[in-house]
Amino acid sequence: MSARPRVCVLHVGGTIGMVRTATGFEPQPGFLQRYIAAMPEMDRPELPAHDVVILEPLLDSADMAPEDWLRIAAAIVARYDDYAGFVVVHGTDTMAYTASALSFLLPELQKPVILTGSQLSLENVRSDGREHIITAILLAGTLAVPEVCIYFASRLLRGNRAQKIHNHDFVAFDSGNLPPLASVGVSVDLADHLVRAPGTGKLVAPALKCEPHVASLRLFPGVAARLLEQVLAAPMQGLVLETYGVGNAPSRDPALLAAISAATGRDVVVVNCSQCHGGSVRQTLYSTGAALARCGVISGRDMTPEAALTKLYCLLAAGLSPAQVRARMQEDLAGELEPD
Ligand code: ASP
């Protein structure tokens, strides 16, 4: 009989492993590990074997910062050769950012890295976390999906295409521009044609060449030129501008457009991403979008703002020049962008 594949479960935080305290839910070290150890399903031969590794400090994902993306990536690289796949147990609030960042930090994957969490803590009798953990381990150990994914509510989504869309429903994530890589019902149905080809398997622990300054700004009616001037002021290097519809912005305020032009003239990379959950940016369709293109704003096409922000961060952190960052932002690096 062949040996069971082995999966590494990295616990980094989130509601799933939290307990109620006097000041609200907080991660409790050891709780998730003890809970999983007590689950009878974990010894079943059809489920991959697993080790649980706690990455301290366990965090509410609202507290996560780019250094935590690097910490998680480094933990995967350090154990990469020892496991068939990885499950990252993470909070839902910023899971789409971490999944996107990991997809850019680990470009040569040959194995699945699956983030999961839950809407209700395992402490709750109706928690959605129990099935998420079991299925994520199963998929990480058995599926030929060499990608960073999110498993949630019976769907395996490409991580850099996913967004948190609900804070109450169990269906907390969706991918507006790409169908699920796998749908999990009575059987696991893999959409083979969507899955990316494996990389070389040679992973390197990401190292920061510099500390990037990036931001995102969601446009709103009445947005003042001064606000954009302030956001785009030095040392800002990259901005995700979250625009209306197919990439439109207010075009009747010359000061607003001048603020953007001045920034792109100083080599700040400004990327246009839509506030809409589905569809693509088309900067030439309306003159309000074309105005942005004339200011030097590049189209983020169908990238999520989460993917665009983390991509900007990773490219700048790798020490690329502004011209290189502009070029690579418009290339598909990890399945985050529609083909041209
Ligand atoms: N605030 C929690 C977190 O993101 C929410 C969750 O996990 O669902 O860590």
Image (tube, grey):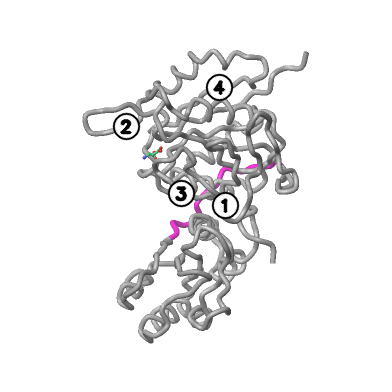
Q: CA distance from mark 2 to mark 4?
A: 23 Å
Q: Between tags 3 and 2, which lies in front?
A: 3
In 3D space, how far apart are the residues under numbered discs 3 and 1 (Cα atoms)?
12 Å
Give the residue pinned by disc 1. 161
Please give the count of numbered marks on the rendered protein: 4
What quarter of the picture does the C terminus occupy?
bottom right
**Which residue is painted at 71% across and 48% down in the image?**
194
Disc 1 C-beta below 8 A from ligand 1: no
Q: State which tag comes first along the sequence, 1 or 4.
A: 4
Magenta residue check for 227: no
Task: Return the residue at label 4.
Answer: 51
Sort mark 1 into few (<14), some (14-19) or many (20+) by Cα contacts within 10 Å: many
Mark 2 sits on what residue?
26
Kindly identify the residue that appears in the image at 40 percent across and 84 percent down.
258
89 versus 211 height, above or below: above
The disc, 2 or 1, on the residue closer to the chain's N-terminal end is: 2
Identify the element where label 1 is drawn: helix
The numbered mark, 3 or 2, whose residue comes first in the sequence reads 2
Residue 59: image x %, image y %?
38, 36
Q: Rounded to the nearest whole Å, what is the CA distance between mark 3 and mark 2?
A: 22 Å
> Residue 127 location in percent, x, y?
43, 27
Q: Which residue is mark 3?
A: 165
Q: Amino acid at mark 4?
A: Asp
63 vs 73, left or right, is left
Name the kind of residue labelled 2 in the image.
Answer: Glu
Task: Determine the CA span between mark 2 and mark 1.
Answer: 28 Å
Relative to 291, does residue 317 appear above or below in the rendering?
above
Question: Where in the figure is residue 195, as x and y percent of width and height?
Answer: 71, 46
211 part of magenta stretch: yes
